[in-house]
Amino acid sequence: MKIAISLLFLISSWGWANPETIRIQTPYTASHSGTPAMLRIIETANRIQRDYMFLLEFKPGGNQVIAVRQMESDPQTNLAIIAASYVENVEAGWIKPTDYVPVWSLGDACWTVMSTVSASNTVAGLRSAQEIIVGTVGFGNASHLTALLIGEQYGIPVKLVPFKSNFDAVVNMVGNNGVNFGIDTADAFENFKSKNPRLRMLAVSCSARLVAYPKIQTLAEQGIRAPAVFNIVMARVEMPESKRKRLAEILEQATARIGRNEIERISGFIPSQFNKVTAQDHFTKSTDLIQQLRTRFQKEIILPK
């Protein structure tokens, strides 16, 4: 609420003449790593044009369905952020994929794969582990699928322990309280590495190595074709295509002004436009891979009824 009020204050001070309000519903809390980037992008978008006033509204819960369904209240003025759980929600019949269209992509999160039972700074270092105990927010999400792929490659059993956030799982791991594998930001690793000398960074979850850790290979470089944590802004199909395209142009322009390095620095995400990948292509590629892997590991995943 304070964020929305502050944005409204800025807009009124700029003297806008009746801009249309576009609310972007996020399924996360304000502490989510992507929030700083979204707020910067929205602030910049509001400065570079006068037709639309973008606001970020927080709608966590419901396995990320609440934020998506909020668009039903007014498909002409609401957008929503989706992540890997979108695939699960479609499988469960909670949302219909034909109702939604990608508009813009915050891209993939360049997060780090961490463990306290690896013998080296690679996923191969997990070979000697008796079990991979992954902590994450849900069965069949990007973190769980990554653990399953590694377990399959090296013949290691995988167990999932659910948490409210990946960060909470890392806290558990650092305290040696059960979890021994997790995926979160490089900042989380930096904050905790001194508290547990066994904590190692094994890989980067996106397609590029981190500048701060040039020797840490990506998962792909280590033979693991795992899905990245992604965020994509969607609209309902009722919103006219011309309007969707205009909103996408504004968000892309704002993103370009801020720049890839700054967005990666404050959030860990790399918007797909910097890799010359459209939101539609990023959506299709990301969701197709997750669907394939959820089918492949269906015995290990508790699918919703």
Image: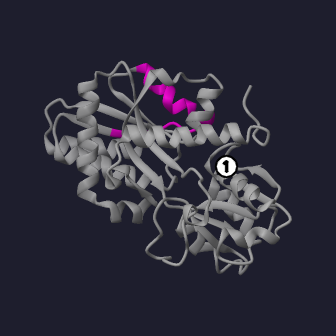
In the displayed structure image, the side of residue 58 where residue 154 appears, left or right:
right
- Residue at position x 65%, y 67% in the image: 114
- Report the number of discs: 1
Element on which disc 1 rests: helix
In the displayed structure image, the side of residue 181 where residue 183 appears, left or right:
left
Q: Quadrant of the N terminus?
A: top left
- Residue at position x 53%, y 21% in the image: 96
Image coords of residue 116 (percent x, y): 74, 71
Q: How is the image coloured?
A: one colour
Q: Quarter-wise, where is residue 23 in the image?
A: top left
- Residue at position x 51%, y 43% in the image: 286
Confirm whether the magenta stretch covers residue 64.
yes
Image coords of residue 305 (percent x, y): 74, 25
Q: Can residue 212 be seen by looking at this rendering?
A: yes
Confirm whether the magenta stretch covers residue 45.
no
- Residue at position x 78%, y 58% in the image: 133
Q: Can residue 10 be seen by looking at this rendering?
A: no
Image coords of residue 254 (percent x, y): 25, 50
Magenta segment boundaries in residue numbering: 55-73
Main SS type for the magenta part? helix
As rendered, which of 115 and 166 lies closer to the eye? 115
As rendered, which of 187 and 181 lies closer to the eye? 181
Q: Which residue is mark 1?
A: 145
In the displayed structure image, the side of residue 128 where residue 227 appears, left or right:
left
Q: Amino acid at mark 1?
A: Leu
As rendered, which of 177 and 140 lies closer to the eye? 140
**Within-10-Å neighbours for mark 1: few <14, some 14–19, many 20+:** many
